Amino acid sequence: MRFSTFVAALLPVGAVFAETWNVTVGGNGTLTFNPTSVNATNGDTIAFTFVSKNHTVTQSSFASPCTNLTTTAGETILDSGFQFIQPNATSFPVYSFNMANATTPLWFYCRQANHCQQGMVFAVNPTAAKSFAAFQAAAMNSSSTSAPAASGGAPSTTPSASGSGTAPPATTSNAAGVIKAGSAAGLLLTGAGLVAGLVL
C-alpha cells in the first residue's frame, strides 16, 4: 500500500468534505441574518460577515431566545462582541466557529437594543420539533434581552475594541457543539493537502 493512500485512509471524512456556511449580518441595513438558518455537519464552519450598523452574534437557547447562553462560570459560550461598521466601510469583520456536534441545534441572536425582539435571530440545525419559525416567534414575543456579555462590551454607536475587523476567537465547548475555528481549519488544510498529494 502506498504511504499517501495509507495516510488518506486515516483522515476523518469531515476533514476533507467540510463546508463553510457564509451568513451576512445586517445586509442592506436590515435586522437580519441571511440565511436565517443552516444545516451544518461536524467540521463545517459557520462564518458571519458583519456588513452594517452595530450587531452581535450571541448564542442563546431555544427556550430563551434573547438571553445569553452561559457556562456554569457565567461566561457566554459564543459571542462575537459588538461589530460596528462605518457607513462607508470597504472591509468587513468576520466571526466564525466550527461544528463539533451537529446533532445539537444551536440558537443565536443579536443583543443590540431590541433587535432580537424584532426577529434578528439565527439557527444551526433546527428540527421539526424546534423550528426556526418557532424560535423567531418566541424571540419576537420575548420581553427582555439579557445584559451585554462580558466579552462583548456594551451597545454603542462608536467602534468597539472588537469592531476593528477581527472578532474574538470562538470558545471551545463540546457541549455547545463547537470547536475553535483555527483547529478545524488546520485539520481541513492538512486533509486537503494530503488529498491533493494523492492526485499528483
Image: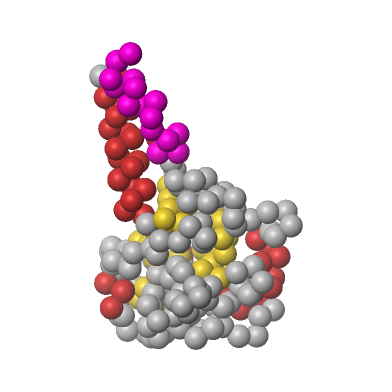
User: Horizontally, is 33 left or right of 168 in the view?
Assistant: right
| Residue 106 falls in image quadrant | bottom right
| Residue toward you, 54 or 145 | 145
Please state, as top left, top right, bottom left or bottom right, where the C terminus lies in the image: top left
User: Horizontally, is 135 left or right of 177 in the view?
Assistant: right
| Residue 169 falls in image quadrant | bottom left
> Residue, x 33% and y 67% (percent of image)?
167
- The answer to whether residue 110 of the structure is visible from this angle is no
> Residue, x 68% and y 54% (percent of image)?
127
- The answer to whether residue 140 of the structure is visible from this angle is yes
Q: Range of the magenta residues?
A: 1-15
Residue 109 screen position, x and y as percent? 53, 71
Count of marks, rendered view: 0
In the rendered image, the vertical position of residue 172 relative to residue 125, given as above or below: below
Coloured how? secondary structure
> Residue, x 40% and y 38% (percent of image)?
15
| Residue toward you, 99 or 143 | 99
Residue 80 screen position, x and y as percent? 40, 70
Please state, as top left, top right, bottom left or bottom right, where the N terminus lies in the image: top left
In the rendered image, the vertical position of residue 108 relative to residue 1, given as above or below: below
User: Horizontally, is 128 left or right of 53 in the view?
Assistant: right
| Residue toward you, 20 or 77 | 77
> Residue, x 36% and y 48% (percent of image)?
184
Residue 2 screen position, x and y as percent? 29, 15
Residue 186 screen position, x and y as percent? 30, 45
In the rendered image, the vertical position of residue 193 relative to residue 107, given as above or below: above
Q: Is residue 41 magenta?
A: no
The rendered magenta stretch, by its main secondary structure, is classed as helix
Q: Residue furthest right?
A: 129
In the rendered image, the vertical position of residue 158 relative to residue 126, given as above or below: below
